[in-house]
Image: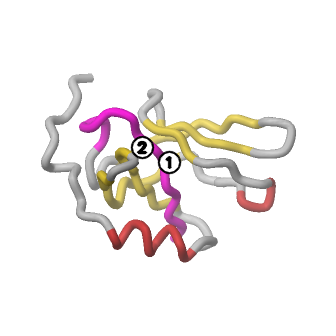
Amino acid sequence: MRIVKFKMERPGQVKTGDQVEISEKKTALNYSYIIEPAVAMSGCYKVSGRIKNRQGTVKKVIHNSRGYYVFVEFDEEETDSQVYEEMNAGEDVSDSVPARNV
C-alpha cells in the first residue's frame, strides 16, 4: 500500500475512512494530484512516482502549524517511508472538526 500526503486548506473536508477520488494534473516535468472536488492538493511527482490508482482511502487527517494534511492510502507499491513517519507523528483531527455540507 502507498500513502500520499495532500495539503488541505480548510478543515472538515474529509475524514478518516472516507473513500476519495483524485484527478491528475500534468506539467512539463511533473505530475500533481487533487482530491476531488478541490479538497486538497498533493506535491509534485516525477513520472516514476505517478499515482496509478484514482481512488484511495483517507488514513489520517492531521493539523500542525503549517495547516491541515490528508494522508490517503492507494492500492499500489509503497514508495516513500518519510510520509509514514509524518503521518504517525500527528494526531488525527478528522473527528474534531465539523464535516462540510456537500
The question of residue 39 being in magenta is answered with no
Of 35 and 6, nearer the camera is 6
What's the magenta region? 1-14
Mark 2, residues whose alpha carbon is within 10 Å: few (<14), some, or many (≥20)?
some
Mark 1, residues whose alpha carbon is within 10 Å: few (<14), some, or many (≥20)?
some
Secondary structure type for disc 1: strand
Mark 1 or mark 2, which is nearer the start of the sequence? Answer: 2
| Residue at x 72% of width, y 44% of height | 31
- State which quarter of the image contains the C terminus: top left
Q: Which residue type carries mark 2?
A: Val
User: Taking 64 as reference, is 21 left or right?
Assistant: right
The number of callouts visible is 2
Secondary structure type for disc 2: strand
From the top left corner, tell me how far across and down residue 74 is, in percent.
51, 60
Disc 2: which residue: 20
The answer to whether residue 44 is above or below residue 92 is above
Disc 1: which residue: 55
| Residue at x 79% of width, y 36% of height | 27
User: Taking 57 as reference, is 2 left or right?
Assistant: right
From the top left corner, tell me how far across and down residue 75 is, in percent.
53, 64
State how far apart marks 2 and 1 are (Cα).
6 Å
Of 22 and 13, nearer the camera is 13
Q: Are marks 2 and 1 in contact (CB under 8 Å)?
A: yes
From the top left corner, tell me how far across and down residue 49 is, in percent.
72, 60
Question: Which mark is drawn over residue 30?
Answer: none
| Residue at x 61% of width, y 48% of height | 43
